Image (cartoon, rainbow, N blue to C red):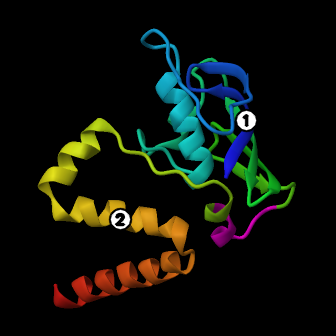
Amino acid sequence: MYIRRIEADNFRNLKKIIIEPNKKLNFIYGNNAQGKTNLIELIYFSSLYKSFRTNKNIDLINIDSDKLKINLEVINNNVNNNVKIKFDNKNKKNIFINNKKPESNVFYKILNSIIYYPDEIIYLKSYPLYRRNLIDRSIFFINNEYINLFKKYIKCLKQRNIFLN
């Protein structure tokens, strides 16, 4: 799997970008506050449809705009997939994979990404819960059925905790 092309408008400080990464290895470098982390966040967001830096998707929209647009070409198992995400400040998100609204379990099959950021590394050393969470996130990409089992497990835990209170 690799990303053939990235196009984005108004994702954080990235007003308009078009990038055609190398399919094997890419280096991202530059001065501070130029958008390096935002580019990584854009790819992660396009993979899991959530940010690793904020819980509010509206924070991803450039402050000078009221909407963002992402278009990725992803090659996965020699199949070309087009991921389009449109999001506005009214919290309306449209996601299309190959010009069709996808089923929820298809999201995670197109673009796989796992991120390790500095704050998380500290937690991994200290708390077993974070280590398990990281392993779970990694397994999601290996076995898609694991996501459904995991969601059922979390639901059972919540029900158990309600019952015990």
Q: Quadrant of the C terminus?
A: bottom left
User: Which residue bears the numbered disc 1?
Assistant: 69
The residue shown at (22%, 64%) is 129
Relative depth, front residue between 115 and 158: 115
In magenta segment, residue 106: yes
Q: Position of residue 12 (x, y in %)?
A: 56, 26
Percent position of residue 89, x then y: 63, 36
> Which disc number belongs to residue 46?
none
Residue type indicated by callout 1: Lys
Nearer to us in this view, 55 or 153: 153
In this view of the protein, which residue sits in the foreground, 133 or 49? Answer: 133
- Above or below residue 126? Residue 109 is below
Give the label on residue 135, or none.
Answer: 2
Foreground mark, 1 or 2, reads 2
Q: Residues within 10 Å of mark 1 (few under 14, many from 20)?
A: some
Q: Which residues are magenta?
A: 101-107
| SS for dot 1 | strand
| Residue 28 placement, left or right of 69 | left
Could you tell me residue 78's position as x and y percent? 80, 57
